[in-house]
Amino acid sequence: MLEPEYYTVKDFQFESGEIIPELKLEYATQGIKKLDNEGNITNAFIYLHGWSGDYTSVENLSSVIGPGKAIDTNQYYVISPTALGAPGSSSPSTSPLKTEFPSYTIKDMVNAHYQFLTSGLGIKHVKGIMGTSMGGFQALHWGIWYADFMDFLVLNGTSHRISNRMYGMYHLMNQIITEDSGYDDGHYTENPVRVMEKSSHLGFLWSLAPENYEQCFQSRNEFLVGVGEREKDAHQWDANDIVWRNKALLDHDLGDKISKISVPSLVIAINQDQIVDFNFCVLPMYEALTDSQLFQYDSIWGHYGCVRDIQKSEDAIKKFIELI
């Protein structure tokens, strides 16, 4: 069981120029910490979670991150922070600023973690960074803006851009939330649970491989039960947190900047991923990266396969790291 810890970044400045006096960041660690003669951590590895995750999400990758695994916690000191904008770290729902909480970008998420790692933990260099889905968006920013900070990147179910279909889905999700009467321009006193359920329902329809919806549900009623279970997940989501996070996601397009990434990178892709499309998102990223390897596999879980079937990539991750 991971235990959360907290660090506060003082006077954090967003890309917009706005400054908040205290930015709280949640994180957890596992593995053996190795220090040099000056007391600096020399074996740090950073795991960055996806859209709906937090510091505990790393536990879902126990088949590749753990003792004796590809990311061996007997060798690496694994740090898994909760992203800026997700509860646990500073977000609209956890900040007294509420609707005045600054809009943030993917780069803001990265800058916050950089300050935490360097000022909070005194880390000058990490072995590697792995990002899943939206965490991979952040990992790419690390490769652009802090290229000398890590030895390698593992880009899991992610891309340098979002497809038009993905853009449309998350744009529609924000519309559904913000146009609901219960949202009240973000000034609600009770979280609008029903509209959050609808948002979760929408996401569910794109998250799996097409085969999953047909093969894993034997009747319409069984399918609706599955949808209902997914909707329950949204009871823990805060509407403003989702709207703010989606705005950051919708602005994600690194374009030609990724050609500047010289850090050795492993691109892990799922053939049936409907959210991060292989042909329009993954393949162009892989081809633009100057030093990259590609590992792709089939998963009936679609985008969720980047967690549910991540064990399929263990050998690829292990071989990639051995070559660094």
Image (tube, rainbow, N blue to C red):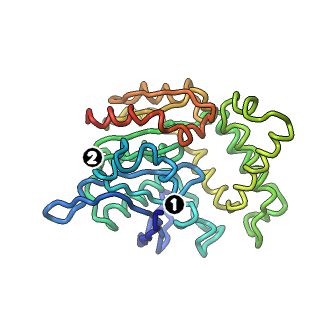
- Residue 121 in percent (x, y) is at 32, 65
Circle 1 sits on which residue? 84
- Residue 45 in percent (x, y) is at 34, 51
* CA separation in Å, label 1 and label 2: 23 Å
Q: Quadrant of residue 207?
A: top right
The first of marks 1 and 2 along the sequence is: 1
- Residue 131 in percent (x, y) is at 45, 45
Quick one: label 2, few (<14), some, or many (20+) residues within 10 Å? Answer: some
The amino acid pointed to by label 1 is Leu
Q: Is residue 67 above or below residue 81?
A: above
Q: Quadrant of residue 9?
A: bottom left
Query: Are the two marked residues, 1 and 2, in contact with CB atoms closer than 8 angstroms?
Result: no
Quadrant occupied by the C terminus: top left
Could you say whether the residue bearing mark 2 is in a helix, strand or loop? helix
Could you say whether the residue bearing mark 1 is in a helix, strand or loop? loop
The amino acid pointed to by label 2 is Asp
* Nearest to the observer: residue 305 or residue 66: 66
Q: Is residue 316 above or below residue 108?
A: above
Circle 2 sits on which residue? 148
